[in-house]
Image (cartoon, grey):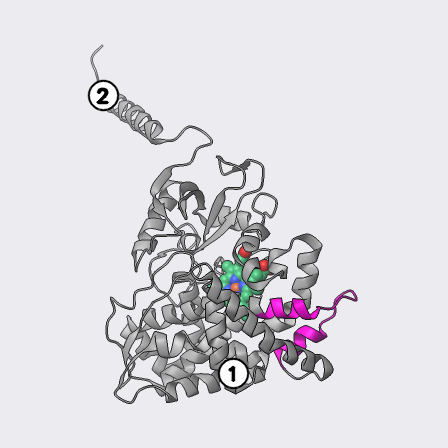
Amino acid sequence: MALTPTLTLTLTLTLALALALALALADTPPMGEPPKYPDLDFGIHQFPGDALHKTLAHLREAGPVVETRFMNMPAYVITRYEPLLAAFRDGERFPPERIYQMMFEPICGRTFQTMTGRDHVIRRRLATPAFRANAVRKQDEDEIIALANELIDEFPSDGEVDFAQHFTQLFPFIIISRLLGIPRDAEREFHRWTQALLRFAEDHARALAANAELTTYLQPIVAARRAEPRNDIISDLVQAEVDGKRFTDDEVLSHVRLIFSAGAGTVHDAMGNLFYHLLLRPDLWGALKHNPSIRLGVVEELLRFETSVPVLPRTSAANPVEFEGTTIPPSSFVLFAIASANRDPDFFPDPHAFKLDRPPKPIMTTFGPGPRACPGMHLARKELALVLDVAVERLPNLKLLDPEAGRPVGAVMRGPEALPVGTG
Ligand code: HEM
């Protein structure tokens, strides 16, 4: 039979298709096994600047679940938006409390974050007012604005400063001390203790000593607020009552430590990322000066574009877990790649662009959608927006002096280590 042009084309296409399929199958791991990247460790590698987003884009293409490493152990990364939403809401296959029992219980003590079921729900409701989970009060807003001004007043007068060291790394710790109602003369000491607490993994002994000092300092304040409540977070914690339950003094102290451990580092990095990305885009900084009303859009887009918690570690359940065609072995590390879901092109068109006109939906995964959603999200947003207002007004000519030094680093917590800026 003579081959007509059409038949030749059909045969060629069929062969090409068969070849492509054979190649794809050769590349596809057996059912139940995800693509593997044993050289990537999200607990150890730094992923400076774009490296994180390029790596995540590659993994997202490879599959909804891929195997990498976390602290030298196998870890399963959930890369795409919809599977990640499902995983956040699935406490059976991915029980959230386990990782927090490992990471935070030694530092904070027992808090609702390390509990499960009804205990989590009741304690979380008891602590809700303290996290400003429903609304940030006017008095808190005034404190935020006042502190931003104070820190700027202390900048060296020669017009150059490390904005990370002198502003973003201090601000979230001091504001929490003020909202707690800690006397002003103790807040730098407080900063030192809470920093040491957060470095528990690096220096156990120092963290324990700091914790003892912190506890001794706080105990009489807790007793005083029980006797005579004021308008502050410790008073909220001692007065809260749900279903006839109240916090004991020990629980109040644990939840104070939790507010620092969950609410200071996250905001410090978020603030660093915000100023880095804005100053990298002088047009945007200029637009903010002329039109301050865009600042809420800027903060929202920053939280999508460069979150301070890009890869959230969990563990899987104690039995094998089937998820998106992958079998995850019992009690494995599972990494919730928030930064990857936030740039999933199927949900966020043109995902690598910083844009202010995105529709409000789909919601980003930055604050952990589901029963564990971040209770500090309103406070975090408010801190970022108000600090931005003050900085634009007080430091209109702020300039990044060394963009390379300011690149965000890290995967579990991500922000700039230094942010050298010119203020004049
Ligand atoms: C930009 C800043 C912040 C980011 C990116 C962030 C991110 C997150 C994420 C992703 C979760 C969910 C974790 C999970 O599903 O296991 C979470 C939970 C939590 N966050 Fe935040 N957070 C921020 C600020 C804050 C602040 C300011 C506070 C406190 C004042 C706070 C307190 C908490 C607490 C206590 C939880 C645990 C909730 C639970 O287990 O029920 N966060 N946060």
Quadrant hosting residue 370:
bottom right
The answer to whether residue 376 shows anywhere in this view is no
Where does label 1 land, which residue? 186
**Which corner quadrant holds the C terminus?**
bottom left
Label 2 packing within 10 angstroms: few (<14), some (14-19), many (20+)? few
Q: Magenta segment: does it hold 298? A: no
> In the rendered structure, which amino acid carries the disc numbered 1?
Ala
| 166, 374: nearer the viewer | 166
Question: Which three-letter amino acid code belongs to the residue tagged 2?
Answer: Thr
Seen in the picture, residue 76 relative to 391 is either above or below; the reply is: above
Which of these two is toward me, 149 or 178?
178
Residue at coordinates 68% horizontally, 65% vertically from top-left? 125
Q: Secondary structure at mark 1?
A: helix
Helix, strand or loop under label 2: helix
Query: Any mark on residue 8, and which?
Result: 2
Q: Earlier in the sequence, mark 1 or mark 2?
A: 2
User: Seen from this angle, which residue lies furthest top?
Assistant: 1
Return the x and y of residue 421 as percentages of the image width and height.
28, 78
- Does residue 242 appear to the left or right of 191 in the view shown? right
| Magenta region, residue range | 232-256
Label 2 lies in ligand 1 vicinity (Cβ under 8 Å): no
Residue 242: in magenta span = yes
Q: Which mark is residue 194?
A: none
Residue 225 visible in this rendered orientation of the protein: yes
Residue sitting at x 68%, y 63%: 123
Mark 1: few/some/many CA within 10 Å (<14, 14-19, 20+): few
Coordinates of residue 69 in the picture (x, y in percent): 40, 44
- Image: 20 above or below 395: above
Query: Is label 1's Cβ within 8 Å of ligand 1?
Result: no
